[in-house]
Amino acid sequence: MTTESHVSHPVTPRRTYLIGRARPNAIVGRNRETGEIALIIGGAFLGMMCGLIVPVLSLRIVLLMGFPLLALAAVYVPYKHRTFYKWFEINRSYKRTLKQGTVYRSGVMEAGTRTDGREVEIGPPPGIGRISWLAAPFGPDEIAVLLHADRRTVTAAIEIEGPGVGLRDSEDQEALVDRFGTLLKHVANGDGFVTRLQMLARTLPADPDAHAKDVAVRGDEKAPGWLMQSYDQLQSMVSTSSEQHRAYLVACMHYTRELSAEAHAMARAARPQSGRKLDRDAGLAVVMARELTDICSRLQEADIRVR
């Protein structure tokens, strides 16, 4: 005989969403880097040449099979959660960093400004890659868009108000999660170019005595003594730790032919309105602003406001 507490309840499966589909973009395998493909081709070429040049049959067979197998092993065989090719790149970068010094110092302070008042552009730190910042109109203001040339991605972030799920009832929490799931489904199955969504939470320190200082400056000195004493007691009972919480929504687009064509079309369409010629990079920023506008409308349906 069992009681209700011992009855096993069905486990609710976790909500998972697939944004975009994995498409093979390499000649050999899927999502292979150019260096990995070159290593495989080089190993096959060396094996073929050894099979044609080496006169000894036994040595010819060993070299003919050895070089391609070594190349495939370096690319595909895992070793300490990575491949030998990845570890070679990591060790080479690490040794080069040790030779050049491990402390990065930006040259922004010594860069100065140009004669027309513009600041001299300073490149990113080593290891970041080739990036460029763009700007596009977004509502009454502008939005900053990051174009990463090496990773072929376009990224932008907007500040949102945290959903505050823990402050709601269970039914409201479930409805809020369902609405946010609808947003992810729309992004995953829609015709847009956004392939990645990420919510970031940031905690910033704040002055715990900010309210007391504000009361000391703007408080009424003619207030009754019992009221001021009561307020001081109430303030002493409150925790002095203070933090500021920020939430951000990051959207990412991968550079494809369709996105390039759309950016080119948006740049040509925006040229008469702005009065100046826009390049394709500026068109990418306009496309990202359009995608974020659509996402913001979905966020409002999910009861998440944009700051």
Image (cartoon, rainbow, N blue to C red):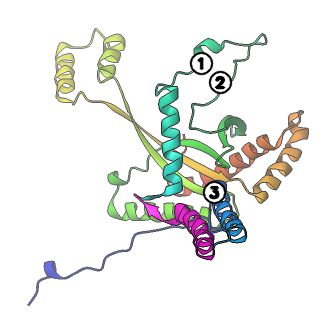
Distance (Cα) linking label 1 and label 2: 7 Å
Q: Are marks 1 and 2 in contact (CB under 8 Å)?
A: yes
- Residue placed under numbered mark 1 in the picture: 107
**Which quadrant is home to the N terminus?**
bottom left
The numbered mark at residue 122 is 2
Closer to viewer: mark 1 or mark 3: 3
Residue 10, by quadrant, is bottom left
Depth check, front residue: 14 or 299: 14
What is the secondary structure assignment of the residue under circle 1? Answer: loop
Which x, y percent locates residue 255?
71, 53
For the point 68% across and 40% down, the residue is 139
Which three-letter amino acid code belongs to the residue tagged 3?
Answer: Glu
Question: Can the viewer see residue 304?
Answer: no
Depth check, front residue: 210 or 154: 154
Q: Does residue 166 appear to the left or right of 45 in the view shown?
A: left
Comes first in the chain, label 2 or label 3? 3
For the point 52% across and 42% down, the residue is 92
Comes first in the chain, label 1 or label 2? 1
Q: Are marks 2 and 3 in contact (CB under 8 Å)?
A: no
Question: Can the viewer see residue 233?
Answer: yes
The numbered mark at residue 145 is none
